[in-house]
Image (cartoon, rainbow, N blue to C red):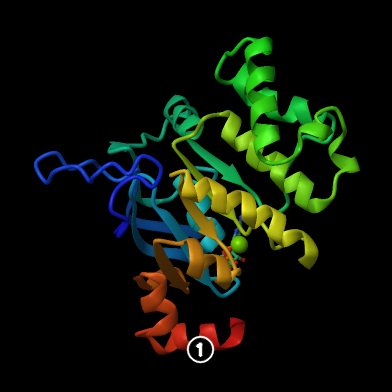
Amino acid sequence: MNTNPGNRETGQTPLSPQSPQPPMISVRGLHKWFGELHVLRGIDLDVDRSEVVTVIGSSGSGKSTLLRCVNYLERPQKGRVAIGGKPVEDTEWAINAMRTKVGMVFQHFNLFPHMTVLGNVIEGPTQVLGKSKDEAVETARAYLDKVGLSDKVDVWPSQLSGGQKQRVAIARALAMEPEAILFDEPTSALDPELVGEVLAVMKELAAEGMTMVVVTHEMGFAREVADTVYFMDEGVILEQGTPEQVFGQPREDRTRAFLAQVL
Ligand code: ADP
Ligand code: MG
C-alpha cells in the first residue's frame, strides 16, 4: 500500500473512497516454473500510481523472474498481471501494448551497441510509438539532459562508463513515457564510485512521482526512497511493509537473517 498522501509532485489529495483508482500494477497468484523448478510460488503485489516499491532478498529467490513476469519477458504459468486495472492478455499485441506502458532497466544496461546514445533513446519512440524522427530526437535530448548526459548524445555505448550507460538506459526507458518503470538491480554491475550517480537519477524520478519497482541490494536507497519494501524468499513474498517496519522491526527470522548479512 502506498502510504504517501497523494502525488508527490502536484500535492494532489488522494482520490475519494467513492472513486478508487486501480493499482498501476497488480499481480495476483503468480506462479512460474522453469521445468521442475518452481521459482515463483504465488506472488501477490500491488503498486499504486507514484508508489516506489523495492524488492529485496537473496540471490536466487526469484526477484528477476518476478519483474520479468510483470512485463511478460517470461510467461507466468499461473496467476495474472493487470496494468492500470486492465488484465494483460497473453497475446503478442497485448503484451507489446503493455510494454509501452511499463519500462524496464536491466542490471547489464542492454544498450544497442551498434547505435549511438541518441540512436538508443530514439529507437523505441520511432519504431514502437511511431513518432517522427524530429520529435523523437527532441524528446531524447530532453531526457538525456535530465540524466546529465547532454554532452554524450553522439558517442557509442562502448565509450561510456557503466554509470553513464545505465543513465542512458534510464533515459531510453523515460523516452517511451511509461506509466511505470521496473529496475532489476540497476547498480549491481557498477563500480562503487558510479553507484551514486545512478541512484541520484532514480531518486529524482521517485520525487517526481514515477511509479517504480526496484530490485536492489542498495539498502540505503530502499530505506530512503521506498514507500513499500518487499522481502522475497524462495519464490514467495515473506514480508512487506514500510522501510521502517521491514528494516527496523522485521517480523520474520529469514528477513532478520538476510538483513544481518547485507546491512
Ligand atoms: P534473483 O533475481 O532473486 O537472484 P532469479 O529470478 O534470477 O533470482 O532466479 C530464481 C531461480 O530461477 C534461480 O534458481 C535461477 O537459477 C532460476 N532461473 C532463472 N531464470 C531461469 C531460466 N531462464 N531458466 C531456468 N532457470 C532459471
Ligand atoms: Mg536477479
How many numbered tags mark residues here?
1
Question: On the rendered structure, is 199 left or right of 9?
Answer: right
Residue 195 figure quarter: bottom right
Question: On the rendered structure, is 247 left or right of 3?
Answer: right
Q: Position of residue 85 (x, y in %)?
A: 27, 38
Q: Position of residue 230 (x, y in %)?
A: 42, 67
- Which residue in the structure is indicated by mark 1? 257
Question: On the rendered structure, is 224 left or right of 248?
Answer: right
Q: Residue at x 70, y 34 (%)?
A: 144
Q: Callout 1: helix, strand or loop?
A: helix
Q: Nearer the viewer, residue 124 or 195?
A: 195
Q: Nearer the viewer, residue 241 or 244?
A: 244
Residue 113 figure quarter: top right
Q: Residue furthest front?
A: 11
Q: Residue at x 70, y 63 (%)?
A: 188
Q: Quadrant of ligand 2?
A: bottom right
Q: Nearer the viewer, residue 15 or 91?
A: 15
Asked if the beta carbon under badge 1 is closer than 8 A to the nearest atom of ligand 1, the reply is no
Q: Position of residue 134 (x, y in %)?
A: 68, 11
Q: Residue at x 82, y 29 (%)?
A: 116
Q: Position of residue 19 (x, y in %)?
A: 14, 39
Disc 1 residue type (three-letter): Ala
Q: Quadrant of the C terminus?
A: bottom right
Instruction: Say if residue 142 shows up in the picture.
Output: yes
Residue 98 figure quarter: top left
